[in-house]
Amino acid sequence: MPDLEQQARRAAHHGPWPDLPPDPHRLPPPGDWFASDAALHLLDKPKFCPHCGVSLDRGLISEWWSGEDRIFLTWCAECRWTGNVVLFSRAVIEEPEH
Amino acid sequence: MLTVEQNEELTRVGPGTPMGELLRRYWYPIAFEQDFDEGRPSKTVRLLGENWTLYKTPSGRYGIIGESCPHRRASLTYGVVRDDGISCGYHGWKYDFDGQCIDQPAENDNTAFRDKIKAKAGVAQTMGGMVWVYVGPQPVPELPRFDVYVQDGIRDIGVATLPCNWFQIMENSVDPHHVEWLHGAYFEFLGQVEGFEAPKSFQKKHIKVSFDEFEFGIIKRRVLEGHTEENDDWAIGHPLMFPYGMRVGGMWIDQMQIRVPIDDTTTWKLFYSLHHPEGGTWEKQDRPVVYDYEWIDENGEFITDYVEGQDVMAWVSQGTITDRSQEHLGRSDQGVAMLRKMFKEAMAAVEDGEDPPGVVREKHDIIELPCEKDKFGAGTAFTDQWINGGSMRYSPIREQLLALHRDAAVVREKAGSGA
């Protein structure tokens, strides 16, 4: 019996397969090239609205990348809050001309 | 990147799905008036994952009803069309325009039975040479009379049925950067390889883009290299028409790009163009000219040596339903993320019993939409480039259209010079 997770680790393009908490969401087949990114998305996406604190299960989280930052455009179906939640590894401040 | 479930929610259009419920709040073009000129006065059409029978009565009224007869499920498309409705060809059960059964020839002594039989039905009417249908809940909204459908001019409509979900075509409409690459750099590369000159107006770099929500969708704006915010591309922009269109134009070619969700994996893609150049003259057109544009060759390869062929390649090659759980959006894709959010908001509005964006309740004569006239700063050269380098190259009236715009440009030039 092949070890699907082992296969996924080998196939993952963007890094090791993360350990996932129990989650009802489905994932692409583990052997897919970008399956590890999909798994990381599931692991790291905001779970609760930053504004009203309600679960975002009915909302929408669309992830996009800017340099090393991972940005989650988040919409809450309860309070209709919309904004970007940013996962960053270091803070960079762009100084305007002065 | 989305989860698998979010992707499914955004792309499933059948009855009972959140997106299907949202999409059933709008009118759709589903046929042309000339489809009913000869032969049977009924045809099967597919919309939002369901088959329907569209028919035209002898007095000219259109009706739309679920294709399967509620009796024994035979196709009503093979029925008998009368002024008061359509009868099934199998046993003659007859339905009025609301789908109510009004006759059961073999059950004549039992009116209670026919009273309880009601087929799924919508409403249909014509505008701009097309037959439009609404198959959602009551009350029926007004059919929006957008400018391109009702203004005077010469019309031609390019059509193709594409094997992909409509939503990935919509996402293309909030992705301005693809223009400078797919229609600019890629077109130029192809021209070098295959020996033709690619149009230059699509090659300008984007300096700035923006997306503003408005009552009918999202207005997309761009500042191109060498341009300023004074240019039409920024000052006016053009709208994505929620939930299945895009209004584009330039130099008196005004176009609605229509993406009818036939089902989860099929889209009827129309380029509805209105040609009405200032200074031009034309005879009143009875009906739009309808033509097929080619997007795949005899070897099954995409045809990418024209603008819309390039777009089709991108949409269809993403897969019938693109897997957004494995995509990687960047900074330039923020319009795409914004569009998804807008659809989610609209689904929530429907759940709450509200009208989603773009549903029109007020009677009106015309709805004029913002759309740039000087496209990409290309001036009158743009009309030649669009007609020859776009889907209109397949139009049977292409030469007539080129002449119309060229002659009008001469008239405008003379008027401008005081000649």
Image (tube, coloured by chain):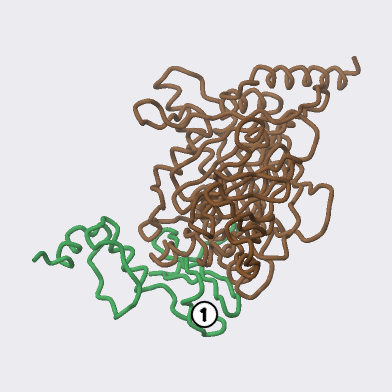
In percent of width and height, residue B371 lies at 72, 43
Question: In the figure, is residue A40 to the left or right of B222?
Answer: left
Question: In the figure, is residue A79 to the left or right of B275?
Answer: left
Q: Amino acid at mark 1?
A: Cys
Question: Up-down: is A24 above or below B249?
Answer: below
Q: Chain of mark 1?
A: A
In this rendered view, identify the residue nearer to me: B157 or A98: B157
Question: Up-down: is B141 above or below B417?
Answer: below
Q: Quick one: which chain is brown?
A: B
In this rendered view, identify the residue nearer to me: B297 or A79: B297
Question: In the figure, is residue B369 to the left or right of B114?
Answer: right
Q: Which residue is mark 1?
A: A49
Query: Which quadrant is home to the C terminus of chain A?
Result: bottom right
Q: Residue sitting at 53 percent across and 57 percent down? A: B334
Q: Residue sitting at 60 percent across and 38 percent down? A: B225
Q: Quick one: which chain is green?
A: A
- Disc 1 residue crowd, few under 14, some 14–19, many 20+, Cα 10 Å: many
Q: Residue sitting at 57 percent across and 62 percent down? A: B343
Question: Up-down: is B155 above or below B344?
Answer: above
Evaluate whether residue B416 shows in this view: yes
In percent of width and height, residue B150 lies at 78, 40
Question: In the figure, is residue B324 to the left or right of B184?
Answer: left
In percent of width and height, residue B180 lies at 53, 38
Dot 1 falls on a residue whose secondary structure is: loop
